[in-house]
Amino acid sequence: MARAFRNLAVPPCLAMLCLAILPLCGCFVQRRVVPPPAHVQNRPLLTATKEELIERVRKTFDPIQSFSMRADMAPSVGSLLGGEITDYATIRGDLLFRRPDQIRVIGLDPVIHSTTVFDMASTGADFRVSIPSKSRFIEGDNNAPPSSKSKLENLRPVAFLNSLIMVAPDPESTLFEDDTDESKAVYILFVVRRDGAALQLVRSIYFDRYSLEINRQKTFDPSGEILSETKYSNWKPYNGLSFPSLIDIRRPRDGYEVTLTLIDMNINPAEVTPDKFVLEQPPGTQVTRLK
């Protein structure tokens, strides 16, 4: 056998290539250790089923029949998906909510908290916005397309409503994913609806697997484009219920973002009555109607 190999004719160039490569083989083979899933937190992961996560949404938001909230509001406008962003001064905000769909948001001057920068309210499909400094009053349909060149003037109360109160999805129209790897550990619920023979993605809800707290929600239009993306963090107890104290609302299509940092929150207070959501047109203001 050894004689047979010695009789084989090996081209000189091949022999030289083999001799050159052999010492370097170790340089082309690297071994690495793959960390366990989401090792960065160095905490045990929690487990839950789709049904348990849906129930968690229900137990978090269904007990909230109304609230009064005071928060610092930091608005930004621009191209949220890449481009120039303009950050505005943080203002103080008072927010009221009452089921099923009433919300009011009052923005106060960052220096003189008694001066109103804007006042907006929504009930059902309609909204009203008052901007005292410009003597403007806007009313119309919540689904009306933005019309102002000033992106902050296109802010709608329904954007706050959809981000602050979450509806538990129907299990039959919800898909489940465990998206856990070495860099993240989340459960995701994908909420879909049927449009004829096709399925449309409506929402996605993200849960932190270290705490099972909700940390993100995205909503989509029929084409799959993102309408809103809200991030939730720093959950705290308010009147015996847990609620995020830091809420970042992003509206990429509308070109604005508002970060809420809660100062105080009162859940189910008796004083949040239907009359609190009546926003009358101030005398002498110019009315713009959007449909």
Image: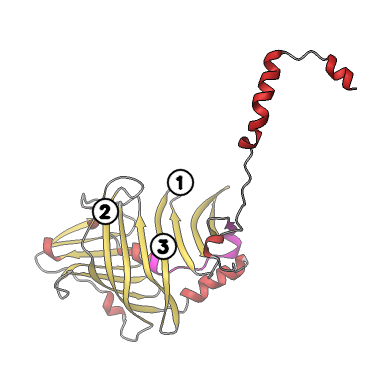
**Disc 1 vs disc 2: Cβ atoms closer than 8 Å?**
no
Of badges 1 and 2, nearer the viewer stands 2
* Quadrant in which the C terminus appears: bottom left
Residue behind mark 3 = 231
Q: Which residue is mark 1?
A: 223
- Three-letter code for the amino acid on which mark 3 is drawn: Lys
Q: Position of residue 272 (x, y in %)?
A: 32, 81
Q: At label 2, which amino acid type do we have?
A: Val
User: Quick check: 246 left or right of 107?
Assistant: right
Image quadrant assignment for residue 136:
bottom left
| 200 horizontally vs 72: left or right | right
Secondary structure beneath dot 1 equals loop
Residue 35 vs residue 3, the one in the foreground: 3
Q: Amino acid at mark 1?
A: Ser
From the image, tell me which residue sits under label 2.
77
Q: Check residue 236 in the rendering and tell me which mark sits there, or answer none.
A: none
Local crowd size for mark 1, using a 10 Å CA cut-off: few (<14), some (14–19), many (≥20): few
Which residue occupies 62% across, 42% down? Answer: 30
Q: Which residues are magenta?
A: 163-180
Taking the image as shown, residue 230 lies to the left or right of residue 255, namely right
Magenta highlight on residue 178: yes
Left or right? Give the position of 54 relative to 15: left
